[in-house]
Amino acid sequence: MGQAEAEDLLRQLAPQVLGALVRRYGHFDTAEDAVQEALLAAATRWPAEGLPGNPRGWLITVASRRLTDLLRSEQSRRAREEVAARLIPPGEWLAPAADATAAEPDDTLILLFLCCHPALSPASQIALTLRAVGGLTTAEIARAFLVPEATMTRRITRAKVQVADSGVPFRMPNGPEREQRLTVVLHVLYLIFTEGYAATSGPGLFRADLSAEAIRLTRIVLRLLPGDGEVAGLLALMLLTDARRPARTGPAGELIPLDEQDRSSWDRAKIAEGVALITGVLPRGDVGPYQLQAAIAAVHDEAMSAEATDWPQILALYELLLRISDNPLVALNHTVAVAMTHGPGAALERLGRLETDRRIAADHRLEAVRAHLLEMHGQHRAARTAYQAAAQRTMSLPHQRYLNARAARLGGHR
């Protein structure tokens, strides 16, 4: 077995193994450490020795033994053997046989719910999800979010302690709680994807590893919840959006806006899969925000040119989305659709209403849209000022360069 194949398999099995240990023993934080050591052992031994007959069982066995060692060490240090004995039933110090775990349930979804516990901040939910469910190392997560590894270590450690202190049982929530927690899980996966697709800071326009991980995790959720329309909608949205990534940058890494992209370089396989997903779920039941966003992305992706884009349909979809989503970015995108359908004058009037929304008032995207609308309206001097203001607000270097270039292009206009 090659190194790359082993790494792919381990990433798939990591959440299942961690879920099995947490279900059996509790101790989320210590179990996560034990699983990481088991994964490291497998990454070292499997390429040389060959794949075991039951890889998940092998990992659960090794991780269980390591967890036992870690718990015993902790008990010894704290002189609390009697407390630990009550936490771990007699006989469970011995790891189960590797061949006894094949029929164990896949606890990945429960683990995702645990990592996205409402007591955690969004940043901690994202970090813990990537670590515990995604199988990324702390160093990889730190690099993705451009923070020191020590900072990310503290963030993940605090998150694990908060989860442990919450006392939440390791089980699938029921009824309204399940729907609420699933909403949080999908939002966390969406945030991971968007940070990968449009990095908020740093020298690069995107971080493909984060986008790919979000897509992989969402595929897992869809496999576990195949009848959920919003899960399918989120995966469709990710695929339809990520399909454009090859055309988003030029030879020097410069940003290329949607209407100027070479559509022949879009990933047609992802577009086909995304369109099939959203087409399959839209006629069924209630329509949620991810399904509507995916439908909008599908309209863009199916247009053979920018001029062929069905903007009236996109506008109608945004109006439906606004009815169910109080999101200022949705309102901003709706404004763009208004401009493309009814002209920039009507859109500029709507844009003024967003200036008082504190959630977006300081966002560079508000000024960037204003600049675009003013340019469309022929107000080039005002557009130039708005482009410059937008460039000052963003921490993304590609976006800064793009916005400053647009401003410079209008330098000779009055």
Image (tube, rainbow, N blue to C red):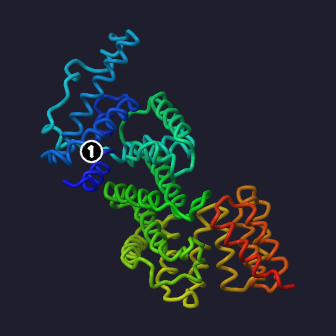
Q: Which residue is more in the foreground, 368 or 201?
A: 201
Q: Position of residue 265 (x, y in %)?
A: 45, 81
Residue at the (51%, 46%) spot, across then down: 142
User: Residue type at mark 1?
Assistant: Ala
In this picture, residue 374 sits left or right of residue 6: right
Q: Position of residue 237 (x, y in %)?
A: 47, 68
In this picture, residue 268 sits left or right of residue 119: left
Q: Position of residue 76 (x, y in %)?
A: 35, 12
Question: Which residue matches tag 1?
Answer: 43
> Dot 1, how many residues are within 10 Å of its Cα: few (below 14), some (14-19), or many (20+)?
some
Residue at the (47%, 77%) spot, across then down: 298
- Screen quadrant of the C terminus: bottom right
Tell me: residue 53, above or below residue 236: above
Residue 361: quadrant of the picture: bottom right
Q: Which residue is more in the foreground, 216 or 22?
A: 216
Q: Secondary structure at mark 1?
A: helix
In this picture, residue 108 sits left or right of residue 404: left
